[in-house]
Amino acid sequence: MGRLASSRASVIVVGFNDEIRQLLDHPPLTTETAIRNKLKVLLIAGKLNFGLGALISAGIYDADGKKILLEKDASCTYPDAVDTFMKTRDHLMPGSYKKAYAFHRIDKKPHILLAYPLTNSRNEQVAVINGIFALSSAAIDEVKGRIVRTAVEAIGIVALITLTLYPIIMTLIGQLSKLAADLLKSNIEILQVLGSAIAKRDSDTDIHNYRVTICSVSLAEALGLDRSLIRGLIKGAFLHDVGKIGISDRILLKP
């Protein structure tokens, strides 16, 4: 909205600059009255040609930021608020010779502050014109409508992406859970195989491995050990005789 207002204002200011170009040749601006009249016409043009609201105040400032002329729209319903704003902020950008715009609230209403350079007949940038543009109710409603539409579109996109990705994510989570279960099963089978191999070295059964494991877990629970430690204890207790695998029968089976 600010860019659109700035673009339309730029066209009006160019025409205004063409009309006062020769009047800006003299720094003291002895033709102040003529420029003031042109400034009043600019306010009327800003009201008729923008289509977004109305230009309620326009001022001309020199390169040092000193106010040269200031005109207000007589039909403005909150002139005191505009006066207060102009006193606290003489113009938008002191010494700036670049086009610019900024949003501000005056009397709790959104306004666009506009700044444009002015050149004399020698094409020298000698002044800056600043304007306060009040957005119309229709323009404000349009901005609010765009915000609401953008928010709704964003929510719709997020919802669509969620609905699209949810089945994929759930499938991947299911596959991951299955892989984790398969890995756990494999680890348990490895423990069982090792336990059986240990038992076969000096016994016909591996009940001893299970008995030691059950006693170890019972003691750990009685001591209140952390569950993660108990899980490690189960593996260690079940495989506590794993060293027997590396001992020769001559020693292990000796009476």
Image (tube, rainbow, N blue to C red):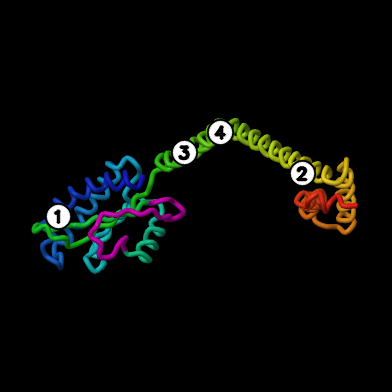
Closer to the camera, 245 or 234? Answer: 245
| Residue highlighted by disc 4 | 165
Closer to the camera, 98 or 135? Answer: 98
Q: Are marks 4 and 1 in contact (CB under 8 Å)?
A: no
Q: CA distance from mark 2 to mark 1?
A: 100 Å
Q: Nearer the viewer, mark 3 or mark 2?
A: 2
- Kindly identify the amino acid type of the residue bearing the numbered disc 3: Thr
Q: Earlier in the sequence, mark 2 or mark 1?
A: 1
Q: Is residue 151 magenta?
A: no
- Kindly identify the amino acid type of the residue bearing the numbered disc 4: Leu
Closer to the camera, 161 or 66? Answer: 161
Q: Which mark is residue 150?
A: 3
Q: Earlier in the sequence, mark 2 or mark 4?
A: 4
Residue 179 coordinates in the image, percent (x, y): 66, 36
Closer to the camera, 231 or 236? Answer: 236
Question: Furthest-front residue in view?
Answer: 250
Residue 30 coordinates in the image, percent (x, y): 14, 65
| Residue highlighted by disc 1 | 20
Q: Which residue is rendered at x = 83% and y = 42% of the image?
A: 200
Observer able to see residue 74: no
| Residue highlighted by disc 2 | 194
Crowd band around label 4 with a 10 angstrom C-alpha radius: few (<14), some (14–19), many (20+): few
- The magenta span reads 91-111
Q: Which residue is rendered at x = 78% and y = 53% of the image?
A: 243
Q: Earlier in the sequence, mark 3 or mark 2?
A: 3
Q: What kind of element bears circle 4?
A: helix
Q: Are marks 3 and 4 in contact (CB under 8 Å)?
A: no
- Kindly identify the amino acid type of the residue bearing the numbered disc 2: Leu
